[in-house]
Image: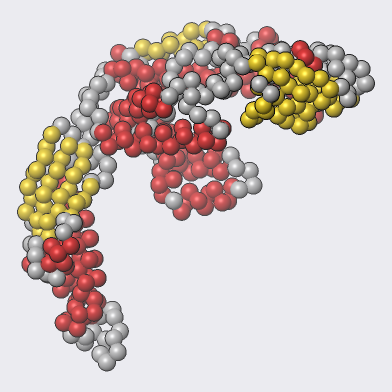
Amino acid sequence: MEITEATSDGLKREFKVKIGAGELEKRVKARLDELKTQVNLKGFRPGKVPLNHLRKIYGRSVMAEVLEKTISENTQKVIADRKERPALEPDIAVTEDKDEMEKVIAGNADLAYTISFEVLPEIEITDLAKLKFEKLKVDVGEEEIEKGLKSIHEDAVTYARKDGKAEDGDQVTIDYTGKIDGKAFDGGSAEDAPVVLGKGQFIPGFEDGLAGVKAGDKKIIDCKFPDEYLAKKLAGKNAKFDVTVKQVAAPELAEIDDEFAKKIGFETVAALREGLEAKLKEDFEAASRTKLKRSLLDRLDESHKFELPSSLIEREFESIWQQVNSELEKAGRSFEDEGTTEDKARKEYEKLAERRVRLGLVLSEIGEKNAIKISDEEVSQALVERAQQFPGQEREVYEYYKKNPEALAELRVPIFENKVVDYVLELATVSEKKVSAKELFEDDGEDDGEDASA
């Protein structure tokens, strides 16, 4: 085997490999000898088929098999001997000249091919012990419990038909058709739509137009879509809604007593409050952890600058871009509806792809240098949790992952990521800051690149 390094520029590597026809012939003969004891051909006893006859029947397919195996083995050897770390599977380029390839298959020419790939960059990890973070903490007091209890109470509201006029808090069931400049528009019509007056679930002016209506009423409600409305095609437009009122119903709230608690799975109100307190603590801790993790990932992203493999960025971007377009298609929306253009969106998601690749490599380097491993038990637990997300289909989900190693490997990614994050937090200085529940859940405007996996 002859090896020539053709390219070593930054992270790019390219090697030209030549394997002599004599070496290929040895491998072909060895494979034909194996077949001699395995095949049954009419007119020949087992193991007594002449080599030339076997070559005549199987020669071409055996050579194809030998070429594939030879390229694979020698590619791995080239990489291993030079201690390279490919970012992705190498690209193998064999001649596209059919006549030349026929000579190789016939055993009359050497095999020449090119190996191309990008290597993982050398990463110098920052001093993790010098990192400082602030973890937000919310104390669950009576105020939070009362708010939670009120929310549960309101969610359990029922409505009873009434004959009078609709008032604030009543539920009005309507059919409506929205028109702009006399023409109905997509998404502007519905039947048996429940509208709770005072909830502010519709555009400004719509619920006000339903105040005082009775079952059987028909009316036209004039509204204007907000200038910042998500669907840009409707933003700022005046609309008229033809409305038919089918029913008016008044809210009925149950008494918060032990009977109410039992209906939602608790023996007493006291038990309900205890369960609510535990759930709030769990939710607050999860939200705090999410913000702390995002802060940590931001810091790691800022403090590590190195050349990124373009192949990894392209793969990550394509994954993100496919998901974005799929979600837009399902929602029947466009980039313009989102207040942007395809070109601007593409650039934003390219930056997100770069962030994810960089963080993925940094976390991987930290994990590798500190021997952070994932146990089979942890993967099994993740699989159980994933299956539980599909009630009634647990067995199918479980079998899918067991039969698809790539899908099962994806379950390992968040486990590994969180273990590395925990490791960094153990080394770093983490102080606590008490905040209100409102402050904890405030959107701080950071990007959605929390998932660092590349």
Residue found at the very far bottom of the displayed protein:
43
- On screen, residue 103 versus residue 256, left or right, reads left
357 up-or-down from 232: above or below: below
Q: Residue at x 26, y 45 (%)?
A: 89
Whether residue 176 can be seen here: yes
Which of the two residues, 358 or 262, is positioned nearer the viewer here? 358
Which of the two residues, 97 or 120, is positioned nearer the viewer here? 97
Q: Please identify the quadrant where the N terminus is shown.
A: bottom left
Q: Residue at x 30, y 13 (%)?
A: 130
Residue 257's image quarter?
Answer: top right
- On screen, residue 261 versus residue 341, left or right, reads right
Residue 102's image quarter?
Answer: bottom left
- On screen, residue 202 versus residue 378, left or right, reads right
Residue 358's image quarter?
Answer: top left
User: Percent x, y for residue 88?
Assistant: 27, 42
Q: Please identify the quadrant where the C terminus is shown.
A: top left
User: Percent x, y for residue 69?
Assistant: 22, 61
User: Percent x, y for residue 33?
Assistant: 19, 77
263 up-or-down from 95: above or below: above
Residue found at the very far right of the displayed protein:
163
